Image: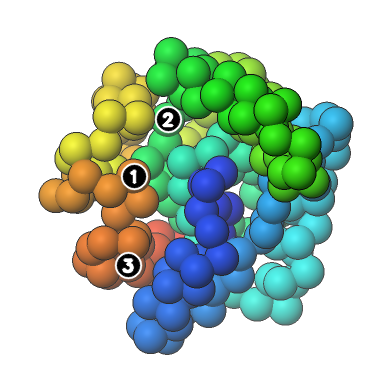
């Protein structure tokens, strides 16, 4: 089994390493697809999808289908990747927001911008941070249409959704809309962490279990 991962906006290298080790301890190959979302600055939706698709293809063209695991902002991009040629057997959305930016998030963006302006010595770091934030805002604008296409499609791809019980950023409304489909399985994890993968190792068991169910169905056809 292979997992390809689209991280959240603020997920750092140490957290990625922690998640990777937990997957690999279960014998699951793990690859993080995007190190820094600033690389998407100024690119169109089509260009970004092509970049991600090529990275998945480079990993899987001689392998079995993979599981695409997306977290938070990464879910926005994962929602766009519905091409069956990618051989994605199961898409996992972890803590999907799938909603417009909240006032709290907007205030954080303004605060970050002001801090960069006041501290020229931090300009290099600050510009990178702003480019990441821009990518987040841009991806959020694509969500409504992508979600509508997803929900109105004739066939919903196998999907697993995990979210923390105490996560205020997750859109329960959207999760409820998606959960009515037979191919969508949802799990509420008893944590407050925006990324339950960092706190509850049972998440990996769920992902593995649901992917194996999908693969079994595919092989029995």
> Which numbered disc covers residue 24?
none
Question: What residue appears at the point 34 percent right and 44 percent down from the top-left corner?
Answer: 194
Residue 194's disc number: 1
Identify which residue, 121 or 87, lies in the foreground.
121
Q: Position of residue 110 (x, y in %)?
A: 58, 19
Residue marked by disc 2: 97
From the viewer's perspective, is 139 left or right of 20?
A: right
Give neighbour class at mark 3: few <14, some 14-19, many 20+ (Cα, 10 Å): some
Task: Describe the element under mark 2 as helix, strand or loop.
Answer: loop
- What's the residue at 62%, 30% (across, down)? 115
- Left or right: 78 as drawn, with respect to 100: right
How far apart are labels 3 and 1 at the CA level?
A: 16 Å
Element marked by disc 1: loop
- Local packing at callout 2 (Cα closer than 10 Å; few below 14, some 14-19, many 20+) is many
Image coords of residue 25 (percent x, y): 38, 85
Residue named by callout 3: 204
């Amino acid at each position: 089994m292979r997992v390809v991962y689209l991280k959240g906006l603020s997920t750092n290298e140490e957290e990625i390493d922690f998640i990777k080790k937990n997957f690999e301890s279960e014998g699951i190959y793990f690859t993080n697809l995007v190190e820094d979302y600033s690389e998407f600055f100024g690119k169109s939706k089509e260009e970004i999808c092509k970049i991600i698709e090529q990275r998945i293809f480079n990993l899987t063209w001689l392998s079995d289908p993979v599981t695409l695991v997306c977290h938070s902002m990464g879910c926005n991009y994962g929602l766009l990747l519905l091409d069956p040629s990618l051989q994605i057997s199961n898409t996992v959305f972890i803590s999907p927001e799938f909603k417009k930016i909240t006032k709290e998030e907007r205030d954080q963006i303004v605060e970050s911008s002001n801090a960069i302006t006041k501290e020229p010595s931090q300009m290099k770091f600050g510009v990178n941070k702003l480019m990441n934030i821009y990518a987040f805002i841009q991806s959020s604008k694509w969500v409504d249409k992508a979600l509508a296409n997803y929900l109105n499609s004739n066939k919903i791809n196998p999907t697993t959704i995990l979210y923390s019980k105490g996560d205020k950023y997750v859109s329960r409304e959207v999760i409820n809309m998606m959960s009515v489909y037979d191919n969508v399985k949802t799990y509420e994890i008893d944590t407050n962490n925006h990324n339950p993968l960092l706190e509850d190792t049972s998440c990996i068991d769920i992902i593995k279990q649901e992917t194996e169910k999908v693969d079994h169905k595919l092989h029995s056809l």
